[in-house]
Amino acid sequence: MEHRMGFLTEEIEELKKRGIYSPTQTTLDTPQVPEAVVNGKKVVVMCSNNYLGLTVHPKLKEAALKATEEWGVGAGAVRPIIGTMRLHVELEERLAKFKGTESSLVFVAGIAANRGTIQALVPTAEDAVISDELNHASIIDGVRLTKARRFIYKHNDMDDLERCLKEAQGARRIMIITDGVFSMDGDIAPLPEIADLADKYGAFTMVDDAHASGVLGKNGSGTVSHYNLKGRWDIQMGTLSKGIGVLGGYIAGPKYLTDFLRYHARPFLFSTAHPPAVAAACTAAIDLLESEEGQKLIDRLWDNTRYFQGKLRELGFDLWKTQTPITPLIIGGDEKTAKFSRRLWEEGVMGTAIVYPTVPRGTERIRFIVTAAHTKEQLDFAIEKIEKVGREFAVI
């Protein structure tokens, strides 16, 4: 008898036809560092979100070990039931100060922060949510969870955003939401122009700063700081698992926002808080970012970015419209992009293929991410291998 879930094997066969299926998952045998052992092979990792190399920083490890010794390995239950450990309170206070807001609320992950906040703030059919067409999947999921009217504007197109705002007039609440740094293209949203339109049409604003955290703004505090928009932007979402190097997501804004979310954001209400080690390590990371050492790491991140991207552009590679360490190398075609990635792997460089539907057809790519932890020697090695494979595939 055919298995009732046989349709899954059909879906896997489709992935195989597209040339993007791998029978085994990628397994690291070392910490998340620029030169790692992955699936038993030593490679230069060029696809990590570990922008500042903080995953293995001694100060973060020390904070995590100390917290585990003093507080244990778990929080015990959801915060509304068991209460909130002092470590979590301290983290939220530090985050609010870091982001220049009155308050913050930490979620178990960035995807939970987006889903919970969007769903809670524009829940009814009388509301409207307006989203950039290239927003992250977690924003798309959050929008799908609402009953609000949905408007999608062309990427970073302010005329089209204004069109959506005009069509949304009469709604009970209007939310505009955008990525700060777009995770696949690496470009930055025009927050000042969005804020102007929000003021004009009575909307409130939310930015997903996952890929701006630790990268843009004062001490890496994000795009609102980058544009000097304090007091003009309503909601900042950030991650604790990329530039911060640990785990989690958060919402920063006025206290009445976080007070509201504590009672209405379902991922917060129904998820156990982070282990004490995570909270302590995140606090240590924020302390580090606001120090001289942290600024040196951010400066090195940008030095490495300019070096790596400059060399690839000199070779003739198309890096799309990036403005950040996210480096999309456009290949085109699912199978070709997957084969390109596998050849890089054979040459000792780990660069992941990104294909449809994550990116539009025709823009399939290898998304490289430069970090502060990469040495010039590692970057030169990667550039040499990327050039070699690029010529094999007639990309340059």
Image (spheres, rainbow, N blue to C red):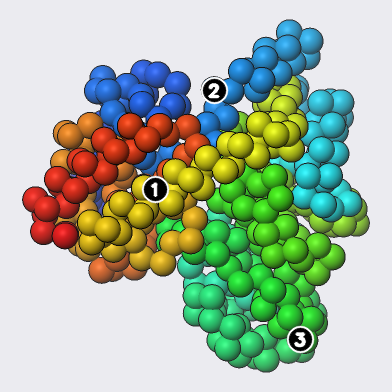
Query: In the image, what residue occupies the spot 61% across and 18% down?
Result: 58
Secondary element at tag 3: helix
Q: Tell me if residue 24 can be seen.
A: yes
Q: Is residue 194 above or below residue 358?
A: below
Q: Which residue is mark 2?
A: 56
Alpha carbon distance from label 1 to label 3: 42 Å
Name the quadrant containing residue 374: top left
The three-letter code of the residue at mark 3 reads Tyr
Q: Which residue is mark 3?
A: 201
- Say whether disc 1 or disc 3 marks the residue closer to the N-terminus: 3
Q: Are the two marked residues, 1 and 3, in contact with CB atoms closer than 8 angstroms?
A: no
Q: Is residue 231 above or below residue 259?
A: below
Query: In the image, what residue occupies the spot 70% across and 45% down?
Result: 219
Q: Tell me if residue 148 can be seen.
A: no
Image x and y of residue 195, in percent: 73, 75
Q: Residues within 10 Å of mark 1 (few under 14, many from 20)?
A: some
Q: Is residue 312 above or below residue 299?
A: below
Judge depth for marks 3 and 2 and give the one in front: 2
Image x and y of residue 82, in percent: 84, 27
Side of 254 relative to 34 (left or right) = right
Query: In the image, what residue occupies the spot 34% across and 61% down?
Result: 319
Q: Which residue is mark 1?
A: 307
- The residue closer to the viewer here, 135 or 140, is 135
